[in-house]
Image (cartoon, rainbow, N blue to C red):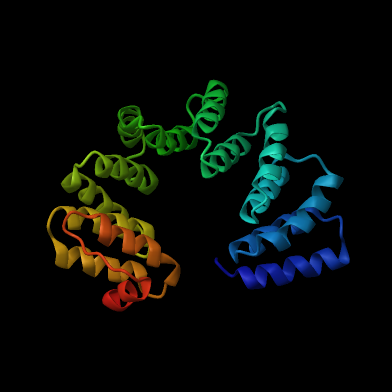
Amino acid sequence: MGQVVEAERLAAEVLKANRTDVGAASILARALMAQRRNEEAIAPLERATRRVEDPGLETLLSAALGGAGRRSEAIDLLRRTTARRPPFLPAFQELAGQLAAAGRFDEAVAVIDSALALAPASLELQLLLAQILPHRNERGRAREILEKLRTVAPGHPDILAALARVLLLDGEYAAAADLYRQVLAQRPDDPLTRTSFSACLLEMGDRAAGEANLRLALRGRPQMIGRTASALAMASHGRFFFRPSAVAKFLS
């Protein structure tokens, strides 16, 4: 329900009464991570993983470690988790994501390929693969995967967004914009999708609509200033500013 502060309080109370409650430790960690307090989530998860061998807890701990900037530790832990059988597919997804975030795209693809050999029908793994492939300039392969996934799960926002990204990179701005509209119909408050949608509009010469959507993406989100500035500067019909403050003022 999104009440992460209350979830944090209740889970902490349970742990005070019973420090071995693995479920409470997991909920506490998730609540802390939802508040971008990854460093605080590490200790209860480490205590829990010392008490029980659980791939879900180890994967959650790895996500907290990665979020706290301790990516090498996260990757080492995930390597051990993914080596166990039966396989725990979310650990493969997290490992591939951590590797991709570190710019190690070949390794990330290898991890997903190994997981798909175990679970070839996994939509989540195929989607993650398609999201990483463009970083290796394999947009054709990514597009083929995403088109197939769209027939399996029509209207899935993550699939539509990933396919739109490939179309945007290939210069098919109108088709990409249409897909981004479908995603925004489901997720109107998604600033990253709205920024990409704006980039399409700017490339199509619709500067007014593009800039209006960038204003929506930035509103109340100062962390989006870099992405909105890039969208403005990189578009062939965009604008360039010398200072982030000037971008913020223009989009305010």
Task: Give the camera-side residue of 11 and 173.
Answer: 173
Please state, as top left, top right, bottom left or bottom right, where the C terminus lies in the image.
bottom left
Q: On the rendered structure, is 63 left or right of 43? A: left
Q: Quadrant of residue 230?
A: bottom left
Q: Quadrant of residue 16?
A: bottom right
Residue at 59% in and 70% down:
3
Q: Is residue 195 above or below residue 249?
A: above
Q: Of all residues shown, which one is farthest toward the left?
A: 205
Q: On the rendered structure, is 215 left or right of 133? A: left
Q: Is residue 252 visible?
A: yes
Counting from the top left corner in percent of width and height, residue 220 is at 41, 75
Please state, as top left, top right, bottom left or bottom right, where the N terminus lies in the image.
bottom right
Counting from the top left corner in percent of width and height, residue 120 is at 49, 24
Task: Give the camera-side residue of 3 and 204.
Answer: 204
Counting from the top left corner in percent of width and height, residue 99 is at 56, 39
Q: Is residue 124 above or below residue 60?
A: above
Residue at 30% in and 54% down:
196
